[in-house]
Image (cartoon, grey):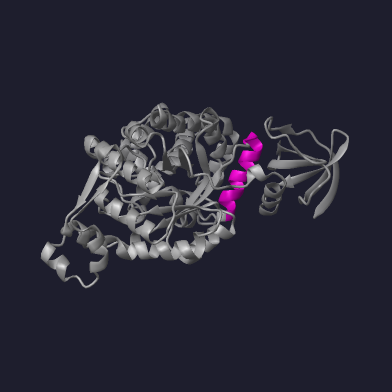
Amino acid sequence: MMTHKHSHLGFEAYPQSHHEAGNTQICMVKTGKGSQLLVQGENPGFEGESVIHDGVTALLAPLNHHNAGKLREVFPFTAPRPGLENGCSIGVGDRLGIATPGHLKVFARYPKVFPILAQQSIRELNLTKRTYEDVLNAASFAVFREGYTSGFGADGDHLKKPEEIEYALGCGFSMITLDCSEHIRNDVPGKSLEDLQKDPQGNANIQSIYADKTFDLDGGMQLHFSKEDALRADLIYSKAIAFMAQIYERYVKGQRVDFEISIDETMTPTSPKEHYFVASELKRLGVVCQSLAPRFCGEFQKGIDYIGDHKQFEEEMKVHAAIARHFGYKVSVHSGSDKFSVFPAVGRQTGGVFHLKTAGTNWLEAVRLVAIKDPALYRAMHQFALDSFKEASAYYHVKAKPENVPALDTLSDAQLPGLMDQEDARQVLHITYGLILTAKNEDGTSRFKDALYALWHKYEDDYAELLSKHIGRHVDLLLK
């Protein structure tokens, strides 16, 4: 579809966005209507309006879903692909659809790291009122704009239901993270051995594979299962393992898609023995995954550093990594944003072969930018976050106490960006992102979203620099 509107226009092109395919030349340009594609030569099916540019008829194409799909057809590097098989991979969830240029500044410095640029959970989609189409399109356009041709992934994160998996795969996502938390029994760890032995869900045949057995790992490590170890592992995880196998057979086997298994969204840490049990059972059932996320010791809360015993974490990470190597996949670290104190241990013990997920830290850097550039807007958003904290706490487990956040009226404008270095303030702003982005005024207009996006687009280079520094710190510590 093309509408004809001939005019003489001057556009500022993004310098890395000039690409050719056959007789088609395309770049991304800044216009009064925001960024658009400028298509010259043969049009392979982009839709937009005809314009005269430098004396030549061209097409000005909006950044919509149709044109994103066409872009992925014409330039395959803008489409996601599997890439978890080897080395280090990092997921950088972009809840706003504007973070990828900053992320790519980091990955340009680390060309061996495979980036998952599109990564969102259904929960995040619901909270931000976005779709998987929106998430993938934003990544594709950014990759094109920045001239990044090395490949990237798209992760349907923490999916729990078949229809969610079908939705993500139908949109072209290259990775599925299966959240098994609803099938893991959290009542088992606190039960006595006597009660466990009476539990009707136990499978004696499975337990006999592990009970009173010792299993060797590389580096001279061994795991010995007592009868009680085998019984507990069976009762906690067997339903979840059956779910993993069912999803694998139905959606993953024989498909070109990365498969990650998540057993981390529980209150009970995954011991190395339990990790081994899950991995061994998956192998026995013929389930192949590229990565698995245990629930590590300590706490991986949103937006702040690791809480727990660092020595214990490193000792257990050494065994978790050995188990993953033994069974041929990578350890995955979820809620990896800002866990700076344990990043060196992750890199060391995995030999740089791991998957890490970040998400909310990109939002917090966007919030920092608001505090720097528009203190009045930040103050209004901050107060709204405080007022909304209780409601948002239903979605996220955090330790933040709003009363520990410095009072706004005691802070100068110059002090506001520093709130993003204070743990309570970080978590309050972190978990209220969905409520902030979807808040409405009485007349139905956006309370914050339109003003926020206008600011972020105006200062897009500043945002990219903040992300390059902050996400870069993550990768520097992980791979130093």
Q: Is residue 270 visible?
A: yes
**Quarter of the rendering occupied by the N terminus:** bottom right
Q: Camera-side residue: 380 or 210?
A: 210
Which residue sits at x=58%, y=52%?
A: 134
Vertical relation: 229 (above or below) 57: below
Q: Percent from the top left, x then y, of residue 70?
A: 71, 50
Q: Indicate the quadrant containing the C terminus: top left, top right, bottom left or bottom right.
A: top left
Q: Quadrant of residue 410?
A: top left
Residue sitting at 32 percent across and 37 percent down? 305
On the image, the x and y values in percent for residue 61 come to 74, 46
Along the line of sight, the residue nearer the viewer: 373 or 26: 26
Q: Quadrant of residue 12?
A: top right
As displayed, is residue 204 above or below residue 141? below
Our reading of the magenta stretch's main secondary structure is: helix
Q: Position of residue 321 (x, y in %)?
A: 34, 41
- Place of residue 304 in the rendered image (x, y in percent of width and height, measured from the top left): 33, 38
Residue 405 visible, this orientation:
no
Q: Farthest residue toward the bottom?
A: 200
Q: Which residues are magenta?
A: 133-148
Q: Is residue 187 above or below residue 51?
A: below
Q: Determine whether, in the image, residue 207 is placed left or right of residue 104.
A: left
Q: Residue at x 20, y 62 (%)?
A: 231
Q: Viewed as shown, does residue 435 lie left or right of 45?
A: left
